[in-house]
Image (cartoon, rainbow, N blue to C red):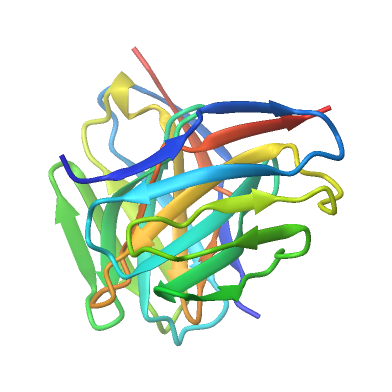
Amino acid sequence: KQEVTQIPAALSVPEGENLVLNCSFTDSAIYNLQWFRQDPGKGLTSLLLIQSSQREQTSGRLNASLDKSSGRSTLYIAASQPGDSATYLCAALLQKLVFGQGTRLTINP
Amino acid sequence: DGGITQSPKYLFRKEGQNVTLSCEQNLNHDAMYWYRQDPGQGLRLIYYSQIVNDFQKGDIAEGYSVSREKKESFPLTVTSAQKNPTAFYLCASSIMATYEQYFGPGTRLTVT
């Protein structure tokens, strides 16, 4: 059974710092891995999708990497801003999308 | 504007009543999904549908029912058989080519 873990559960950093969020999964035969952002009380916003044949994807200040052999993905956020404060979820697709519990990120001005 | 709409945003019901949550998409996606989100439990899949008039149970389908009569619409009924229905419900759709999922804004259901 696929399990997805995100550590840490919460992270607080000062504005301007670069940071890395971690995601690990137990079954490396994934079809893709997707990173989402969720603001309180809102739906999920898709940030990046990495297909199993890809190693990384970039969008603006965000870069996501995928290492299937080690069962890990990271989301790198450059030059963090207070508007980046949200919960970030990763999800791995096998037969269905399996979500991690999320990392609650706070960027302090 | 393409997207997924869910209505209503907040829903209150008495215990023992069935309630239907609406989900509509104009993205021309084939697949649609319903998830439930509870604090500390992450998102769990309730039902999904890959084509019209066909749907499959997810991990927690007991107490829920769905229909897919149109490609754009995938309503979820929370029945009185659902033991703990109070939760945040999220609808999603995906492109079959990449399976990238897009989510609606969610419906918060409170049953008392």
Vertically, is A27 above or below B43? below
- Residue shown at the point (51%, 68%) measured from the top left: B48
Q: In which quarter of the image is the C terminus of chain B?
A: top right
Percent x, y for residue A83?
30, 23
Residue at the outermost bottom position: A29
The answer to whether A95 appears left or right of A78 in the picture is right
Q: Which of B78 and B39 is in front in this view?
A: B78
Q: Give the mark count.
A: 0
Percent x, y for residue B41?
69, 49
Residue at the outermost top position: A109
- Residue shown at the point (46%, 75%) measured from the top left: B53
Percent x, y for residue A68?
39, 80
- Residue shown at the point (23%, 78%) measured from the top left: B97
The answer to whether B61 appears left or right of A51 in the picture is right
Q: Which of A75 and A93 is in front in this view?
A: A93
Vertically, is A2 above or below B3? below
The part of the image, by quadrant, that contains residue B5 is: top left
Q: In which quarter of the image is the N terminus of chain B?
A: top left
- Residue shown at the point (60%, 32%) measured from the top left: B108
Q: Nearer the viewer, residue A71 or A39?
A: A39
The answer to whether B107 appears left or right of A49 in the picture is right
Residue at the outermost front position: B69
Percent x, y for residue B36?
62, 50
Vertically, is B52 above or below A21? below
The answer to whether B53 appears left or right of B42 in the picture is left
